[in-house]
């Protein structure tokens, strides 16, 4: 089986702005994969390229081995997208919205009705099935976007910031649901600003910045890239900070409080204790704090100089590009429904 997503040297330019810069990324079938990055990193552009809402400038992008442009229909049929923005037909009861969506993918009316009911139950808004989108609360709207993504029973579920602005209860419900889906075999691509979410859910994460892939790693691997702090309380104040060459990246002392920065706190603590005792210090207390994924993320995505930046001309050329997107969006009526480009 080919990977769920495989892109090679993918580039997207909006006028002078390179939103994706030679992005090569592989997401294996069955993975729960996170795409992290600050605002404007290119996450939505990447997703929109996969679903045919944005036309790539160069490079290749395949979904389960299907080229997203030359084999658009096969690639698109494999994907369920829950976009960041609410883009649902407001004039129909939500059950019908879901049935229309299934219909676009060639599913018979009878089966579409069954599937609509099934996914509405699954996301917990079946009792709202005859209501219109506008009448739903914000949280229910998020649930509906997920239901719409699921109604075609996709092999690849793409969630673009599914928990942005939702309450804690819904966030946990959504986490539970997507974990279940992944356990049932659905590949998941999730973009999020919540590091905790990525850490909790994802097998691997790609960190993007300014259209580039900064790194791909498991959340645990990422955490090992930071430094830990060992905080030691001494029985009595010391006059000078001890020299701990060899493993300490930094040592600071304030009275009886000593802070030592090391690569791996757990592995280094015994050595540190030994060394301090050998220097005549008595230890009252010791605590290790691990670098949070958030700190590592901030560190990895510190602003760099852009090789190509938006120029004043790009606003107008962005308009020309929009024209290209618009013609792409007319290829299938559903694209307008799901479109966020
Ligand atoms: N249609 C467009 N025309 C011109 N520029 C665009 C267009 N869409 C996105 N951009 C620009 O491309 C860059 C990447 O945007 P994108 O929305 O992909 O980032 P993102 O990582 O999804 O951000 P966020 O986390 O804020 O959603 C940004 O600089 C954005 O302004």
Image (cartoon, grey):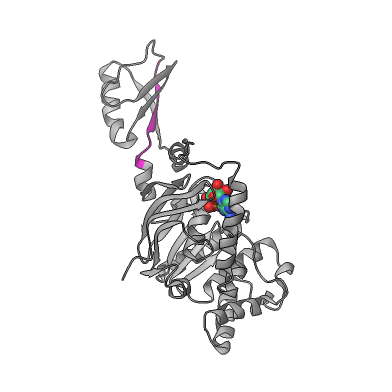
Q: Residue at x 34, y 25 (%)?
A: 249
Does the magenta-highlighted stretch encompass residue 233?
Answer: yes
Residue 266, image x, y percentages:
32, 37
- Compared with 292, 184 (above or below) is below
The boundaries of the magenta stretch are 224-236
Residue 154, image x, y percentages:
47, 73
Quadrant hosting residue 53: bottom right
Residue 73 showing in the rendered view: yes
Residue, far top: 239
- Compared with 277, 149 (above or below) is below
Closer to us: 145 or 243: 145
- Compared with 265, 117 (above or below) is below
Quadrant hosting residue 61: bottom left
Closer to us: 299 or 237: 299
Residue 163 showing in the rendered view: no
Q: Quadrant of the C terminus?
A: bottom right
């Amino acid at each position: 089986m080919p990977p769920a997503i495989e892109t090679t040297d993918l580039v997207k330019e909006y006028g002078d702005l390179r939103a994706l810069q030679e992005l090569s990324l592989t997401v294996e079938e069955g993975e729960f994969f996170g795409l992290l990055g600050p605002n404007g990193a290119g996450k939505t552009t990447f997703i929109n390229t996969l679903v045919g809402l944005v036309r790539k400038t160069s490079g290749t992008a395949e979904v389960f081995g299907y080229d997203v442009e030359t084999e658009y229909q096969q690639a698109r049929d494999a994907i369920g997208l829950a976009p960041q923005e609410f883009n649902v037909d407001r004039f129909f009861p939500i059950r019908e919205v879901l049935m229309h969506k299934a219909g676009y993918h060639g599913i018979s009316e009878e089966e579409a009705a069954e599937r609509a009911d099934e996914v509405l139950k699954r996301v917990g808004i079946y009792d709202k099935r005859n209501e219109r989108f506008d009448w739903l609360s914000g949280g229910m709207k998020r649930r509906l976007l997920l239901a719409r993504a699921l109604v075609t029973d996709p092999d690849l579920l793409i969630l673009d910031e599914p928990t942005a602005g939702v309450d804690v209860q819904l966030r946990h419900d959504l986490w539970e649901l997507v974990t279940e889906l992944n356990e049932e075999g659905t590949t998941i691509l999730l973009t999020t600003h919540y590091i905790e979410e990525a850490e909790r859910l994802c097998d691997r994460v790609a960190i993007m910045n300014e259209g580039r892939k900064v790194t791909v790693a498991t959340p645990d691997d990422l955490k090992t890239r930071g430094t830990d702090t060992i905080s030691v309380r001494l029985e009595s104040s010391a006059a000078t900070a001890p020299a701990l060459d060899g493993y300490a990246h930094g040592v600071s002392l304030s009275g009886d409080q000593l802070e030592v920065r090391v690569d791996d706190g757990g592995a280094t603590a015994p050595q540190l204790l030994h060394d301090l005792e050998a220097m005549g210090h008595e230890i009252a207390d010791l605590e290790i704090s691990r670098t949070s994924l958030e700190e590592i993320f901030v560190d990895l995505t510190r602003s760099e100089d852009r090789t190509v930046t938006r120029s004043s001309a790009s606003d107008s050329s962005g308009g020309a590009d929009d024209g290209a997107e618009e013609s792409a969006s007319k290829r299938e009526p559903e694209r307008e429904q799901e479109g966020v480009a």
